[in-house]
Image (tube, rainbow, N blue to C red):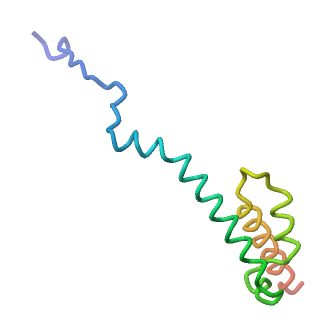
Amino acid sequence: MRMTEQTLELDCGKPTRTFSQRLAAGFAPLASLFRMFRNRMEINALHDLNDSQLRDIGLTRADLTSAFVASTFFEDPSEHLTRSARNRWRLQLFRSYPE
């Protein structure tokens, strides 16, 4: 028998997931929901800061309000705040360059 005529069949099917992997996949949506509610509570705590402290982290009171208005109950408003802070930082960066 020649080497070219020999074939080797490999079982390359989808590997079965372990119990811990299935358990982690089952709890992933619950962990995401918990993270969203925790972020909402942290954003509520940002309302206690004064305007200069908010400005230090790149936010305004309007950003806090719009984050809650723009996001639905099951969306994470922290993404909106992150985008607002980054956009404000970019605008300040471009304004600081001399023409």
Residue, far bottom: 52
User: In the rendering, at what x and y percent does residue 71 appear?
Assistant: 80, 55
| Residue drawn at (53%, 53%) of the image | 31
Q: Front-most of 84 and 45?
A: 45
Q: In this view, does 88 lie above or below 73?
A: below
Q: Dividing the image into 4 quarters, which one contains the C terminus?
A: bottom right
Q: Front-most of 25 and 34?
A: 34
Q: In this view, does 99 lie to the left or right of 16?
A: right
User: In the rendering, at what x and y percent does residue 92 appear?
Assistant: 83, 80
Q: Is residue 24 left or right of residue 48?
A: left
Q: Front-most of 24 and 97?
A: 24
Q: In this view, does 9 lie above or below 52?
A: above
User: In the rendering, at what x and y percent does residue 74 appear?
Assistant: 72, 50
Q: Dividing the image into 4 quarters, which one contains the N terminus?
A: top left
| Residue drawn at (81%, 62%) of the image | 68
Q: Is residue 14 left or right of residue 63?
A: left
User: In the rendering, at what x and y percent does residue 60 appear?
Assistant: 84, 78
Residue 47, by quadrant, is bottom right
Q: In this view, does 41 lie above or below 16?
A: below
